[in-house]
Image (cartoon, grey):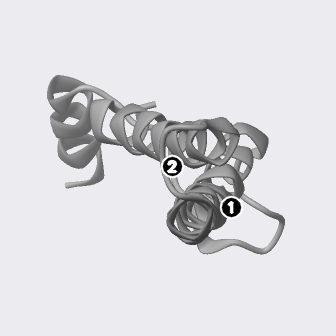
Amino acid sequence: MSLPEIGAIALTRGLGGAGAALLMSDKVPEKRKKTIGIALLAVGALSTVPLLIDLFQKLRGPAKGDPESNSPRRQSPRAAVKDLEAIA
């Protein structure tokens, strides 16, 4: 996983945690606490779904019939040049 993906996951977890903590706190007036807490919790939970879908797709690899599943494996530039020279 890339650093931006890890950051996005951490951010969504933080939002969800902040919403849950706010819902359990006693320092904020009840009506405001409920409104803000539910909003933070919902944003954290809903923004996690696309990240999880992307992560599971990456873990499973390309699907059958996916054009990327038939792509040649990566090779070094030197090996690619040798392959092209062999064709010519």
Residue at image coords 29%, 52%: 87
x%, y% of residue 39?
56, 69
Label 2 Cα neighbours within 10 Å, binned few <14 / some 14-19 / many ≥20: few
Position of residue 47 relative to residue 7, above or below, is below
Give me the disc on residue 49.
1
Residue at image coords 49%, 38%: 27
Position of residue 15 relative to residue 38, above or below, is above
Q: Count the marks: how many?
A: 2
Position of residue 49 relative to residue 8, above or below, is below
Q: How far apart are the two marked residues, 1 and 2, measured between alpha carbons?
A: 31 Å
Lower sequence index among marks 1 and 2 = 1
Secondary structure category for the residue under label 1: helix
Q: Which residue is mark 2?
A: 72
Position of residue 4 relative to residue 70, above or below, is above
Q: Quadrant of residue 44?
A: bottom right
As shown in the figure, which amino acid type bears the numbered disc 1? Answer: Val
Near-viewer residue (30 or 75): 30
Residue at image coords 22%, 48%: 84
Residue at image coords 74%, 47%: 56
As shown in the figure, which amino acid type bears the numbered disc 2? Answer: Pro
x%, y% of residue 78?
16, 25
